[in-house]
Amino acid sequence: MTGDGGAWLREQCIILTRTDHTSVFEWLALPLEELGAWIEAHNAVENRLRGEKGNGR
């Protein structure tokens, strides 16, 4: 996550943009701490849904 020149953060913003159908600039306008919280929440939901799909739900 660190030392990659911001690649990880850009990738996460693109994922949020594709999921939420918003502009990437809306995500980039957030304070870094808030953006990080949204990324964590999004990833947690995606992981949970992936787990449910794997369990036949």
Image (cartoon, rainbow, N blue to C red):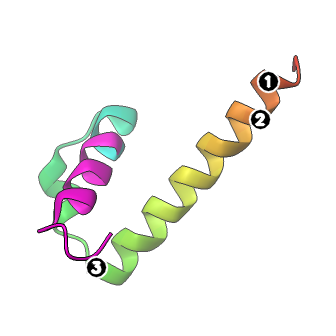
Question: In terms of image quadrants, where is residue 32?
Answer: bottom left
Are dots 1 and 3 in contact, CB under 8 Å? no
**Quarter of the image with the N terminus in it:** bottom left
Q: Position of residue 37 (x, y in %)?
A: 47, 72
Nearer mark to the viewer, of 1 and 3: 1
Residue ID for mark 2: 51
Question: In terms of image quadrants, where is residue 8?
Answer: bottom left
Residue ID for mark 3: 32
Against 12, is 35 above or below? below
Question: How packed is label 3: few (under 14 Cα within 10 Å), some, or many (20 or more)?
Answer: few
Residue that appears at 64% across and 47% down = 45
Q: Residue 17 — which label?
A: none
Q: Residue furthest front?
A: 3
Q: CA distance from mark 2 to mark 3?
A: 28 Å
Magenta residues (range): 1-15
Q: Would residue 2 be counted in the magenta stretch?
A: yes
* Dot 3 amino acid type: Leu
Front residue of 25 and 2: 2
